[in-house]
Image (cartoon, grey):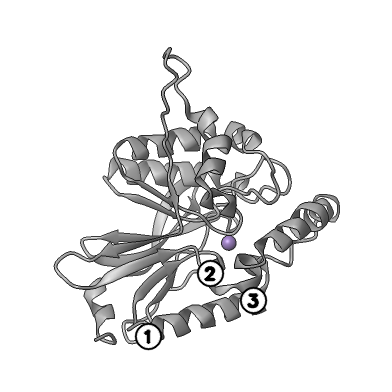
Amino acid sequence: MHKGDNSYADDFVHNVAIYKYALEHYYQNDFIYFELGDGVELWENKSFEPIYNTYKEIFDLQLKFHKQKRLHLLWGNHDMVFKDKNVVEKMLNRFFTDKQSKDKKLLFNVDFKESLLLDIDGTNKSIFLIHGHQADFMNYSMWKFNRFLVRYLWMPLQKTFAIKDPTSPAKNYKNSIKVERNLKKWIVKNNHQIVIAGHTHRPKFPLPNEVPYFNDGSCVHPKSIIGIEIENLEISLVKWHVKNKEIIKETLEGPTDLSLYFSLSL
Ligand SMILES: [Mn+2]
């Protein structure tokens, strides 16, 4: 999502209405929400405050999921500071305290993880969720260097000359291919473990006889958001966008029975 501060460099702001509509749909229909990292843009923004002020409605909606234990957040490279619990506390918690009550209780005891493993009911298989920058050396081991370039070089240029940041795999085709190749290699080495990642912003939905690497795309595509749904052990790739002045959901791939992806593993 790369939620920013509503400036020109904020890539999410044009999709906020679509995103909010989709998230409300998932809330009403009892879905559990998994956000696969880079939910907020903390390379371009040093402080969380302008992001919170811009997207308060979205955070309130996420809070509703959280209260029902239906919210799971991972950190990516652009919000890698959330790896540290103290940073989460310092940066986020003061925005999510109950200002009405005297004891200032915390509304949103948010807990960011690096990855999650979802067991698939009735099988010994699972789905591994990660952001995906783990397969991208410059954005995992060297992320502080890339953050420096984005903050002090690319973002000022982007604001002035509309130049896009080349460190982002989302804007760098060659690097995306490399990340995908690394992830697929890992999957094959690990008994064809099903993986869902983000990071590259390139949606991927394999055929059952292919390496089970899924990518949920992003919410910063021009005029649409893309994501992955899992319902009744069936997986699909969906896109929400505006058609005839209405926000609609289109299924791009699937629904495909998850068990079809087990055939390559032992
Ligand atoms: Mn990323």
Quadrant housing residue 45: top right
* Residue linked to disc 1: 210
Q: Relative to 103, is 30 above or below? A: below
* Residue linked to disc 3: 175
Q: Where, quadrant-wise, is the C terminus in this rendering? A: bottom left
Task: Say what secondary structure mark 2 lies in.
Answer: helix
Asked whether residue 148 appears in the rendered view, the answer is yes
Mark 2: few/some/many CA within 10 Å (<14, 14-19, 20+) = some
Asked whether residue 255 appears in the rendered view, the answer is no
Sequence-wise, the earlier of marks 3 and 2 is: 2
- Percent across and percent down for residue 9 are 72, 49
Residue at (75% x, 61% y) in the render: 164
On the picture, is 147 further left or further right than 15? right
Q: Relative to 258, is 28 above or below? A: above
Residue at (40% x, 80% y) in the render: 187
Nearest to the observer: residue 183 or residue 56: 183
Task: Say what secondary structure mark 1 lies in.
Answer: loop
Marks 3,2: beta carbons within 8 A: no
Residue at (45% x, 64% y) in the render: 130
On the picture, is 119 further left or further right than 5? left
Ligand 1, what quadrant? bottom right
Sequence-wise, the earlier of marks 2 and 1 is: 2
- Percent across and percent down for residue 184 are 46, 82
How many numbered discs, if any?
3
Nearest to the observer: residue 140 or residue 195: 140
Identify residue type, mark 3: Asn
On the picture, is 261 further left or further right than 186? left
Task: Say what secondary structure mark 3 lies in.
Answer: helix
Identify residue type, mark 1: Glu
* Residue linked to disc 2: 134
- Percent across and percent down for residue 99 are 48, 18
Quadrant housing residue 150: bottom right
